[in-house]
Amino acid sequence: MDQRIAILGNGSWSSALAKLLNDNGVPFTWWMRNREAMQHLIEEGHNPHYLSSVNYSTSSIHFEPSLERAIQEASLLVIGIPSAFITEVLNDLPGAVFNDKKILSAIKGILPEQSLLLNEYLQQRFGVSSTNYACISGPCHAEEVAAEKLSYLTFASADEKLASYCAGLFRGKNLNTIVSTDIFGVQYAAVLKNIYALGAGIAHGLDYGDNFLSVYITNCFAELQQFMDVISTQTQHHYNTSAYLGDLLVTCYSLHSRNRTFGNFIGKGYSVAAARLELNMVAEGYYASQGIHRIGERLSYRLRIADTIYDILWNKKPAALAFASIESICS
């Protein structure tokens, strides 16, 4: 399978994936909305805003300022644009722009307005087939990939050959890969773990200790499994949730976790607006909490922990009061 590759986006995760390809000697096109960042990368060899300590060999990177041209010239598209901005970036593209393209999603969230996973949006808007779609999950942090620490990624697709091919592109001495056909499970687990990690941060900000946190995460995983059972009956899709426990753990515990950091600010009394300014990066769990809440409403199903995090973020429920109710859930 010979693919011409383009990365769309230049946040932390896109930058980490670009480094993996670069280290493996894989040439690729890189599109980003920030023209100043692109010019800085061309001239200085590193991203000024994300993973700024990482240097790239730019001789094997084609920097393309036109999104449509970057898509047209590639056959495999790695989409790393935050979920909150996907429709803003893609909606004006021609309907046939993704014809015969393979998509590798590096998004760990739900499109907030539509409350859809990326594959569902791409199928509805652009007619992208499930066999042309793959996605990436952890357990893995961009910062540790950049620091060349041993990391693990899961690649999932309805077409196992596509998942295996994508895994091979990124696999290296510091990166192990797992191949799966569970695209819904991989994505929903990634969405929920960000919400639960945000809650872990809130708990830390409220001065709960490690003992509570361990019980909290255990209950989060149980809720994730129960939600997957509900989704499974809707999609007739088999899930393997045990494969995603590691991603939940690292996102809840790691100091690299943006969602945990964002939640910590909330627990310490910051408003959502102030926490967003302080973090200066997108915390996918913030938007995901609203998306999962809407999906739960659509299914007439309540996720008690995830919905409590939603109430804190979107309904301004006091964090201490909300976590008093989570205590009863976890008892």
Image (cartoon, rainbow, N blue to C red):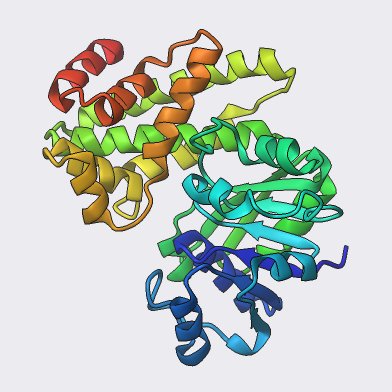
Residue visible at 35% across and 28% down in the picture: 217
Q: Find residue 66 and report its horizontal and vertical position in percent.
A: 64, 72
Q: What percent of the width, then of the height, locates residue 85? A: 50, 50
70 sits left or right of 323 in the view:
right
In the shown orientation, is residue 280 left or right of residue 107?
left
Against 301, residue 192 (above or below) is below
Above or below, 270 against 59 in this view is above
Height in image: 131 above or below 59?
above
Q: Quadrant of residue 61?
A: bottom right
Query: Percent from the top left, x then y, of residue 257?
Result: 35, 50
* 98 or 60: nearer the viewer: 98
Residue depicted at 41% across the width and 63% down the height: 143
Residue 60 seen in the current view? yes
Quadrant of the rendering where the N terminus is positioned:
bottom right
Residue at 69% from the left image edge and 67% from the top image edge: 6
Query: Which of the 4 quarters of the picture holds residue 28?
Result: bottom right
199 on left or right of 159: left
The C terminus lies in which quarter of the figure? Answer: top left
Q: Is residue 151 above or below residue 147?
A: above
Residue 31 lies left or right of residue 220; in this view the side is: right
The x, y position of residue 11, in whole percent, is 46, 63
> Which is nearer the eye, 150 or 302?
302
Q: How many marks?
A: 0
Residue furthest top as drawn: 300
Which residue does the image show at 48% across and 42% down from the upper left? Answer: 247
Asked if residue 171 shows in the view, the reply is no
